[in-house]
Image (tube, rainbow, N blue to C red):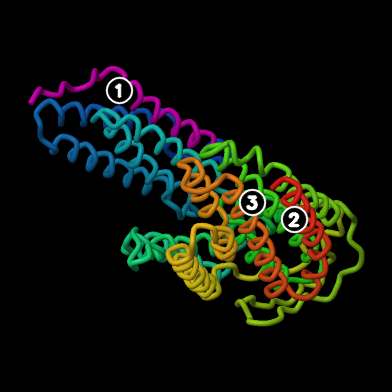
């Protein structure tokens, strides 16, 4: 096995010094702004980085970790002494952020010299950013209460502890149920609630909802529909119109996503289907524009969920005026936003998806090839992307006629749109259902007409 040569040390040492200068510059500016006496500044951080670099060079030269350990201990001792001096000069001093940053700078400089420059430099940038954005970070933290924190912990546990333990393969004989992907759907729906929660608080109901819809629909327009409908049911009436507009935008993105998948797998299908997709997109976009751009009047009564109780938690309005259609600042949001970190509704929704996916797999296994349209309709109850890719590949390999594959995709898209309307009406209430009904009806009728003329 050929011996791996150490990288040239000059660029590594230069990177180490740059790390010290970057973090030190931020601390020097903080020191000047706060009029701190005796605090560590730019020169101290450059020297700390130099010490880390020298310690790493010595460790590498004699192939022993002890020189670097000694340097880290020495820097830590100096930092503690500096902290004691600073407290003696200013008794108001309570935090040790600068001192911890100095130790981190030493360690990052050593990491760069030890051959991990690509990791050390981004970490140094992240450290400097965390130091520089002290006040914005504090404002973000103050915006969350204890319930939000507990919910975030649930989401992190679900994402980084439960998800890696699940097998990423189908466990049933019909290759339908993948526990990893089903749980990933639970996390997605919950995370979309987080995106909407933060966006609405930061940018206001209208702009925040728009950002949530576009970003989330790139992954799952169904999840966007459920999240925004639940949010609209949990706040005052002024949130229903922006949420309905965001849902329609999500549906438009879904149709665009089908087009992208067809371009990637089988462009011949897109030649057949583009009028249908356009018929789905244009009415939804027109409805979204009408809902988002038309000024809102007096606050409507809160939309009450009807039906199965998807888990929306009602909250009391704070009594302020809504966004009124005039602005998007967070100060114009008129209601306290409900805690979005509820896993229960997302788990129930994923369970429903699992049942539908299993039924679709059974249908595809036992129905005749001519019944692919029915399979598409069944698949559309749960998802459109899967049947789109499946039909595109089947027609590309001539396992199915092009017109039959196109009809299956159309059936899936129409059924999926109807299912999402049902979800929105159930989770969002009668007002939401009424706002979405015109655009939904026009989209479905226009798509059916385009499919009849085209196919």
The CA span between labels 2 and 3 is: 17 Å
Q: Nearer the viewer, residue 393 or 160?
A: 393
Q: Tell me which corner region of the image, top left, top right, bottom left or bottom right, holds residue 422.
A: bottom right
Horizontal arrangement in the rendering, residue 389 relative to residue 59 (left or right): right
Label 2 secondary element: helix
- On the image, the x and y values in percent for residue 163 come to 37, 62
Are the two marked residues, 1 and 2, in contact with CB atoms closer than 8 angstroms?
no
Residue sitting at 39 percent across and 38 percent down? Answer: 123
Does the magenta stretch mainly form a helix, a strand or a loop? helix
The CA span between labels 3 and 1 is: 50 Å
Q: Which residues are magenta?
A: 1-29
- The residue wearing badge 1 is 13
Above or below, 92 against 436 in this view is: above
Above or below, 111 against 218 in this view is: above
Which label is found at residue 254? 3
Q: Nearer the viewer, mark 2 or mark 3?
A: 2
- On the image, the x and y values in percent for residue 171 come to 33, 66
Disc nearer the start of the sequence (3/1):
1
Total labels drawn: 3
Horizontal arrangement in the rendering, residue 279 relative to residue 37 (left or right): right
Residue sitting at 47 percent across and 38 percent down? Answer: 128
Q: Nearer the viewer, mark 3 or mark 1?
A: 3
- The residue wearing badge 2 is 448
Q: Nearer the viewer, residue 76 or 206?
A: 206
Q: Nearer the viewer, mark 1 or mark 2?
A: 2
Label 1 secondary element: helix
Q: Tell me which corner region of the image, top left, top right, bottom left or bottom right, holds residue 13.
A: top left
């Amino acid at each position: 096995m050929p011996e791996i040569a150490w990288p040239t040390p000059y660029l590594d040492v230069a990177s180490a010094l740059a790390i010290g200068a970057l973090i030190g510059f931020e601390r020097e500016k903080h020191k000047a702004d706060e009029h701190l006496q005796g605090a560590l500044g730019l020169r101290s951080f450059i020297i700390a980085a130099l010490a880390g670099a020298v310690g790493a060079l010595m460790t590498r030269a004699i192939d022993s970790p002890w020189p670097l350990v000694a340097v880290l201990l020495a820097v830590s001792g100096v930092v503690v002494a500096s902290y004691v001096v600073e407290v003696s000069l200013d008794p108001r001093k309570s935090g040790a952020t600068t001192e911890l940053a100095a130790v981190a700078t030493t360690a990052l400089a050593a990491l760069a010299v030890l051959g991990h420059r690509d990791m050390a430099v981004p970490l140094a940038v992240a450290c400097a950013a965390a130091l520089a954005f002290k006040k914005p970070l504090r404002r973000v933290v103050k915006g969350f209460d204890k319930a939000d924190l507990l919910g975030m912990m649930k989401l992190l546990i679900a994402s980084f502890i439960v998800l890696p333990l699940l097998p990423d393969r189908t466990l049933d004989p019909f290759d339908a149920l993948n526990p990893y992907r089903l749980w990933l759907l639970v996390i997605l729906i919950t995370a979309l609630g987080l995106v909407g929660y933060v966006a609405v608080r930061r940018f206001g109901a209208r702009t925040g909802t728009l950002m949530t819809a576009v970003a989330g629909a790139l992954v799952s327009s169904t999840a966007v529909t459920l999240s925004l409908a639940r949010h609209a049911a949990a706040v005052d009436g002024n949130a229903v119109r922006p949420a309905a507009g965001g849902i329609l935008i999500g549906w438009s993105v879904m149709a665009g996503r089908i087009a992208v998948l067809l371009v990637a797998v089988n462009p011949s299908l897109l030649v057949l289907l583009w009028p249908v997709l356009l018929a789905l997109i244009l009415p939804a976009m027109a409805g979204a524009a009408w809902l988002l751009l038309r000024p809102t009047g007096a606050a409507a009564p809160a939309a009450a969920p009807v039906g199965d109780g998807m888990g929306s938690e009602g909250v009391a309005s704070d009594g302020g005026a809504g966004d009124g259609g005039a602005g998007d600042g967070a100060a114009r949001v008129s209601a306290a936003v409900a805690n979005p970190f509820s896993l229960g509704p997302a788990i129930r929704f994923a369970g429903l998806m699992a049942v539908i996916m299993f039924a679709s797999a059974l249908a595809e296994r036992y129905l005749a090839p001519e019944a692919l349209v029915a399979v598409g309709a069944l698949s559309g109850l749960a998802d459109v992307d899967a049947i789109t890719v499946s039909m595109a590949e089947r027609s590309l390999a001539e396992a199915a006629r092009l017109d039959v594959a196109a009809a299956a995709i159309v059936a899936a898209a129409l059924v999926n749109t109807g299912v999402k309307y049902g979800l929105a009406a159930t989770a969002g209430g009668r007002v939401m259902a009424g706002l979405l009904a015109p655009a939904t009806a026009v989209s479905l009728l226009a798509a059916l007409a385009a499919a009849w003329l085209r196919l």
